[in-house]
């Protein structure tokens, strides 16, 4: 597995890097959707024309930034999910742990910290609907990726290590018997 990880096709490494970057960027951009008042008068006028628009204006402070953050988050998550299901990568537990699960957990923690810091500093401790949704999605992502990390690191990879150790022991005993 380690040899496979070292010889991994460069396109997978680039894809995982871009996906991780997109996901992190989504986490770091989304708090900007609830940090300041709407600055675009054109968007504000458009949203004020109907009841749904007025509701959205009060919930989402910067709709274009929200769209960018959601696009980055969804595209990063989709790319990482695709990589986890590529047959060549699916069984390479060290690669998945090091390139997908650990960065995903760290980025989710960064997203949670950014959200909490933003609410405490820019919002004066007031949790808007967007801040609550962001915290819930980021927290769920952290829980899921932490569970996957634990599953792969402490169960799947450990099982392979034990099987490998058993094979080495049996080879050693055969060699010492001869």
Image (spheres, rainbow, N blue to C red):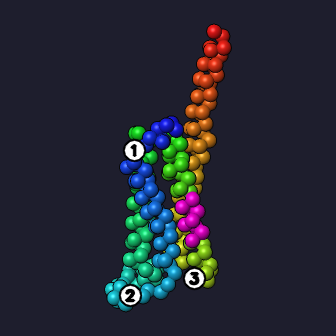
Of discs 1 and 3, which sits in the foreground? 1
What is the quadrant of residue 70 in the picture?
Answer: bottom left
Q: Is residue 113 magenta?
A: yes
Question: Which residue matches tag 2?
Answer: 40
- Label for residue 104? none
The secondary structure type at the circle numbered 3 is: loop
Query: Looking at the image, which residue is at 59% across and 43% down?
Result: 153
- Height in image: 24 above or below 50? above
Say few, some or many: other residues with alpha carbon within 10 Å of mark 2 (under 14 / 14 to 19 / 20 or more). Answer: few
- Give the x, y percent position of residue 61: 46, 81
CB under 8 Å between discs 1 and 3: no
Q: Which residues are magenta?
A: 106-114
Q: Residue at x 38, y 77 (%)?
A: 64
Residue closest to the far top: 178
Which secondary structure, mark 2? Answer: loop
Q: Residues within 10 Å of mark 1 (few under 14, many from 20)?
A: few
From this view, report whether residue 77 is shown above or below residue 43.
above
**In the rendered image of this protein, does residue 95 appear above or below residue 43?**
above
| Nearer to me, 15 or 157 | 15
What residue is pinned by disc 3? 122
| Residue 173 highlighted magenta (yes or no) | no
Label 3 Cα neighbours within 10 Å, binned few <14 / some 14-19 / many ≥20 = some
Observer-nearest residue: 52 or 130? 130
**Res. 9 mark:** 1
Q: Between residue 146 and residue 92, name the one nearer to us.
A: 92
């Amino acid at each position: 597995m380690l040899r496979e990880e070292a010889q991994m096709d460069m396109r997978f490494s680039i894809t995982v890097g871009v996906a991780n970057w997109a996901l992190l960027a989504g986490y770091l951009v989304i708090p900007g959707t609830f940090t300041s008042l709407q600055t675009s008068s054109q968007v504000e006028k458009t949203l004020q024309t109907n009841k749904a628009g007025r509701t959205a204006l009060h919930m989402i402070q910067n709709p274009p930034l929200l769209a960018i953050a959601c696009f980055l988050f969804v595209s990063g998550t989709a790319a990482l999910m695709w990589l986890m299901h590529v047959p060549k990568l699916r069984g390479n537990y060290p690669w998945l742990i090091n390139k997908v699960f650990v960065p995903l957990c760290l980025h989710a923690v960064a997203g949670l910290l950014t959200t909490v810091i933003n609410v405490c500093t820019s919002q004066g401790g007031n949790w808007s609907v967007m801040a609550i949704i962001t915290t819930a999605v980021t927290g769920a992502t952290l829980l899921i990726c932490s569970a996957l990390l634990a599953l792969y690191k402490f169960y799947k990879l450990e099982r392979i290590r034990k099987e490998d150790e058993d094979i080495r022991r049996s080879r050693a005993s055969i060699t010492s018997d001869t």
